[in-house]
Amino acid sequence: MKINICNHDCTELWDGVLYKRLSNYPNITDWEMKNIIDFINYEKFNGRKTEIISDSDDIIEKINKALLEPEKYSNPNKPKKITECTACRYRKGCMTQFICHTSPLENAIKIFECGKLLSAVNARRLPAEILAKEPRNAANDPADFFHYVMFTWGNCQAGDRLVMERKMDRPPTDEDMGINLTPGIRFYFEYEKLEKHPNAIHDGFLPIKVKDEVVIADYVNAIIIPEEYQKIVEEIIPYDLTDRTYYINNNCKDVWDWSEKVYSFIEEINTVS
């Protein structure tokens, strides 16, 4: 694996390279340094070395120094908003109070039936090595990734983009993510609560991922279902999840509107009166 730290448009993991964007390049915050260290440690745990690349020798020097004293960066303050990625048209960054797992309808039905979010290995009952070789693994993620349930920041549209990619069996177009968007079902979790899951880890890229499975009733904050699916799923929602399940009308013009509408709703229901 490689970490490429330059003035990128966003942070992205693709084909064995973590393209790391800094919120105030070339300065590195303690939070960003923690994530770089987490990435290197995760790769080491899985038997891979990490090469650090940057157009700034000063950045490489700071990282090498931090790796000698990682305890200094073990518990930095989590920003309320992360501005490594500014693709979000509304927030201009990732909001960090809640994280999200997004699923297409057919997968969500299976999730409700078993009461768990499952890793790809457990859900599809295939070896990780087979899953890693599938064409749908366009990012060329290594096999160990498929042992985890993945989460994005709560206002991110990446989950719905993946849902549309799976539906269309190709990269979605702007029109797909606009007027033709069919949003997935979103499972929302409080970051601080899910972080305490015994199998939760930080890989330096995703906010959190959890090995094997997450029992929904034990951790979920809210489940957001597009209204068009209500009649399909309302009879199979487990009783202990009904008071945390909400149906929202997708009257939005694109995925950005939908993501903002949903995340604003999550913030609203979690605001203490």
Image (cartoon, helix red, strand yellow):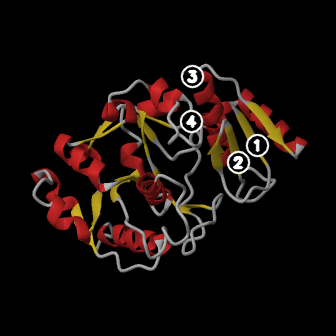
* Badge 1 or badge 3: first in the primary sequence: 1
> Callout 3 environment at 10 Å: few (<14), some (14 to 19), or many (20+)?
few
- The answer to the question of whether label 1 and label 3 lie on touching residues, with beta carbons closer than 8 A, is no
Q: Distance between the residues labelled 1 and 3?
A: 20 Å
Q: Circle 3 sits on which residue?
A: 46
Q: Distance between the residues labelled 2 and 3?
A: 20 Å
Residue beneath the point at 71% across and 53% down = 21
Q: Circle 4 sits on which residue?
A: 141
Task: Classify 228 as above or below 203.
Answer: below
* Badge 3 or badge 4: first in the primary sequence: 3
* Badge 2 or badge 1: first in the primary sequence: 1
Q: Circle 2 sits on which residue?
A: 20
Q: Circle 1 sits on which residue?
A: 4
| Left or right: 212, with 88 as reference point | left
Q: What element carries label 1?
A: strand
Q: Position of residue 153 (x, y in %)?
A: 48, 55
Locate the N terminus and report the quarter of the image it occupies. top right
Give amino acid for label 4: Asp
Asked whether the viewer can see residue 189, the reply is yes
Foreground residue among 67 and 109? 109
Q: How far apart are marks 2 and 1 (CA)?
A: 6 Å
Q: Is mark 4 on a helix, strand or loop?
A: loop
Q: Which of marks 3 and 4 is in front?
A: 4
What is the tally of numbered marks visible in this picture?
4
* Badge 4 or badge 2: first in the primary sequence: 2
| Left or right: 152, with 89 as reference point | left
> Callout 4 environment at 10 Å: few (<14), some (14 to 19), or many (20+)?
some
